[in-house]
Amino acid sequence: MQENREKCLELANRIYNLDEEVYHCVGSSLGRTFTGNKENTIQNLCMLMLTKPDGHLLRSELALISNMARTIKDKKKKTQMMTEYDNILKEIEALPDSFGKIDIVDLARAELNPTARKKLSENDHLVICISRTQGSAGNDIGFELADDLHINYYDVEIFNQVLTRLEAEKGSVNDTETEPFADFDKYRKRNFRLKTWFREFNRYHGLPRQDAVFFNMSDLICNLARTEDCVIMGRCADAILTNNHIPHLSLFISAPFSLRVQRIMASKNMDFHHASRFLRQMDRQHKKYYDFYTDKRWGRPENYDLCINSANYGIRETIDLIERMINREKEPASGSL
Amino acid sequence: MQENREKCLELANRIYNLDEEVYHCVGSSLGRTFTGNKENTIQNLCMLMLTKPDGHLLRSELALISNMARTIKDKKKKTQMMTEYDNILKEIEALPDSFGKIDIVDLARAELNPTARKKLSENDHLVICISRTQGSAGNDIGFELADDLHINYYDVEIFNQVLTRLEAEKGSVNDTETEPFADFDKYRKRNFRLKTWFREFNRYHGLPRQDAVFFNMSDLICNLARTEDCVIMGRCADAILTNNHIPHLSLFISAPFSLRVQRIMASKNMDFHHASRFLRQMDRQHKKYYDFYTDKRWGRPENYDLCINSANYGIRETIDLIERMINREKEPASGSL
């Protein structure tokens, strides 16, 4: 402790002197960082080094000195000052309980995050889970990203087809021919029939149909993520994979409401009123699904690795950004292999 | 229009054939994408190309074919299939009103976004605005990022000091000596005095003091961003710079509440109860300040370019991620010039 105090006193002296020297070199109109009495200043600096909770104030003082030092015109002087600044910073960081010492990291999650440069095993795959708000071009981004990276793409339509076929294979369903465009009907209201209800009750072992689908979907998503590189759109894939300790990157793509409305108006030939209502309804549905199955709150930045505002980039630039993040920038154009 | 229809018919035929060929190569247990009658399938595919609103369903069908094609073992066959897939995709994208045609982009904002690879003029600077939740290590990340990039760092303590000095220079304040650690007192309650109120009323031309400070701060932030590369913490800098059409990257750094509580407990020597209460209070204050001055909602992904969950990366990896995004990866260690 005594040793620590002496080290702090030495550092405080060096900080005070650096400030003085930088001031002489710059002659800044803002004057010196420390304008008070030398002895008091050094006492205060020592105190900042010894009191953890206010350590960030010391860092601000240092930043202020280095901000000024960077404006020194004489190159030799500047190098000299910045070298002393670097040394002081390193020595302070080496003090026990210094600022920057306490990391914020969820190790279990970071180890499964392919963009955190943690060591993934060779058997792990690049799995990118994308959640998005309707109208923010999340689907276009996911599709083109998968195509760029030459990896598989899965969205709700594909999952539904795959699940339908898996069921058909198991022989548990043979009531309708597998119909490639069955999803055409999915936004139309269907009449509820008791007969249908009973059939579905038996088929899904008493689980409500949507829960059964969710569990089948979860199995499928885990199997995919264990065996191949892919982009998975929605379906709470991020939460499912986290629960199953399978590495993946989780992205949330959104854009301001006004821009999403404009895009829906253009892409779906809707007027402003209908587009707004449609978006609000879709946002509610997304939220309900995610909140129900994950017990977290949809669209909150702390639930994903990264959130991207696609309106501030556009489709192509968002894809480029993601590729830079995962260190897989697009190679010069060639075949899709 | 007629020409368009013929083109769609040709493409639909090629898609049907591709699916058939891929199926023969793979022999997938999942079977073909299109299991129905050929004529009907081609009619349906044409319809999908001609009806904008459901265009994404066509994309899903194509993705399903390419997902299977990628599993073909025979390399020559695979190249052949993927080349035909690429060609079909390009031709569909070239159709009027095809999927992916309608971008989501706020041009005014994207042009000022240094990570969107838009052409910034040579006079523009790299300005990184960081908002964050308390306890998510946002300050540590900002400070170390600035240090890595050798650019200036500004946080609330530095702004306050600079503003105090600028005021002192103008000669408008001489009631106290400029005190380097005045901020020590800032969380202590001070007694409200009528005399102080009158003095501040005159000094700020009748504006409430906090608004006057905000406007001075805004001027300072704009001046900085116009003249140097820097990292700016908080102060709604992103909104201020957007309003003034000054290029900048806006980041929001957050982490799950439970991890922030753990970090505050460690860094401020608080127990769980106090740390939770402190964080909730700070979140409320941040929110109030941001919402009041920007008219937007704090912490919503659509208000920033990017949101990063620091807990899923840790301090160092978050910085590396940001450096990859702005294409400025850390050079091998050297002096801070």
Image (cartoon, coloured by chain):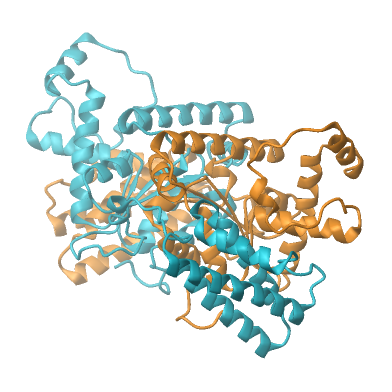
Chain colours: A orange, B cyan
Taking the image as shown, residue B2 lies to the left or right of residue B31, namely left
Residue at 60% across, 74% down: B13
Nearer to the camera, B209 or A75: B209
Question: In the orientation shown, which residue stands out farthest toward the bottom?
Answer: B76
Quadrant for the C terminus of chain B, please. bottom left
Report x, y in % for residue B30. 79, 67
Q: How many marks?
A: 0
Picture quadrant where residue B167 is located: top left
Quadrant for the N terminus of chain B, please. bottom left
Q: Is residue A197 visible?
A: yes
Nearer to the camera, A39 or B304: B304
Nearer to the camera, A220 or B263: A220
Taking the image as shown, residue B122 lies to the left or right of residue A164, namely left
Taking the image as shown, residue A213 lies to the left or right of residue B201, namely right
**In the figure, B164 relative to B310: above or below?**
above
Picture quadrant where residue A164 is located: bottom right
**In the figure, A52 relative to B101: above or below?**
above
Taking the image as shown, residue B243 lies to the left or right of residue B81, namely left
Residue at 23% across, 58% down: A69
**In the figure, B152 relative to A301: above or below?**
below
Question: In the orientation shown, which residue stands out farthest toward the front?
Answer: B2
Report x, y in % for residue B295. 34, 31
Q: Is residue A102 visible?
A: no
Report x, y in % for residue B113. 32, 56
Picture quadrant where residue B81 is located: bottom right
